[in-house]
Amino acid sequence: MSVAALVLAAGGGRRYGMPKALAPLPDGELFVERAVRTARAVCDPVLVVLGAAMVEVWQRADLHGATVVGNRDWETGMASSLRTGIQGLQALGAGIEAAVVMLVDVPGLTPEALARVTAHAAPDALVVPTYDGVPGHPVLIGRDHWAGVADSATGDEGARAYLREHAVTEVDCTGLADPADHDTPRA
């Protein structure tokens, strides 16, 4: 059994001014490249959901080792990307016991934080990391919950409503990563 990474990178980045998948970090690496590299350090397989500027992301980004799926409904919000990703994971096969959902706009995520969360992987697991007591990302969703998460996801809520209604294991990742999401460019 394996733990997959599901990188949600389909948004148009309206507040950011461009699709965040294509946003460069100070070292020149694109947000989506950082997410894939971080995911590959811990997870196999890695699945990336693209939407806005999908062709440009495909052409410019090094997504080596990742499976890419397209979300035609990306403009409807994160929930459609989560559903698209879950469908992609199901198509990859039954050997995946859980998936850790990563947002492309959290480039400060580290393999150490990812490993701490994925250490709790099981088909019935729901795991949320906390940073100084505040819930963050990545969220681990066991295979037994995929259908429920997909059914309950709406708009930009993703799995939030589902997680509120179910028992969740919180894992302290304070100091292991920068949990900040980048909604706007930083100087």
Image (spheres, rainbow, N blue to C red):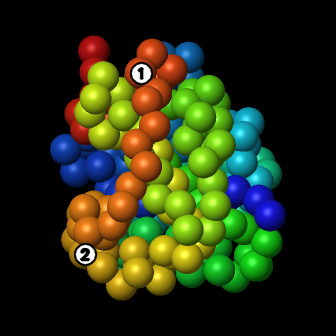
Q: Amino acid at mark 1?
A: Thr
Q: Please state, as top left, top right, bottom left or bottom right, where the C terminus lies in the image.
A: top left
Mark 1 residue element: loop
State which tag comes first along the sequence, 1 or 2. 2
Instruction: Give the structural element (helix, strand or loop) at label 2.
Output: loop
Q: Which residue is mark 2?
A: 154
Viewer-side label of 1, 2: 1
Q: Nearer the viewer, residue 156 or 171?
A: 171
Left or right of 161 on screen, residue 102: right
Q: Quadrant of the N terminus?
A: bottom right
Q: Is residue 72 visible?
A: no
Q: Is residue 74 left or right of residue 24?
A: left
Residue 134 is situated, as x and y percent measured from the top left of the image, at 26, 33
Q: Where 14 sits versus 122, above or below?
A: above
Instruction: Name above or below for residue 16 compared with residue 172.
Output: below
- Residue 174 is labelled as 1
Q: Residue at x 63, y 30 (%)?
A: 111
Quick check: 163 above or below 171? below
Alpha-carbon neighbours of circle 1 within 10 Å: few (<14), some, or many (≥20)? some
* Image coords of residue 182 (percent x, y): 31, 33
Residue at 43%, 69% in the rendered image: 82
* Cα distance between the residues tagged 1 and 2: 29 Å
Give the number of the disc on residue 99.
none
Taking the spot 59% from the left edge, 72% from the top edge, the residue there is: 143
Task: Judge from the rendering whether residue 57 lies leftward or rightward of residue 8; answer left or right.
Answer: right
Mark 2: which amino acid?
Answer: Thr
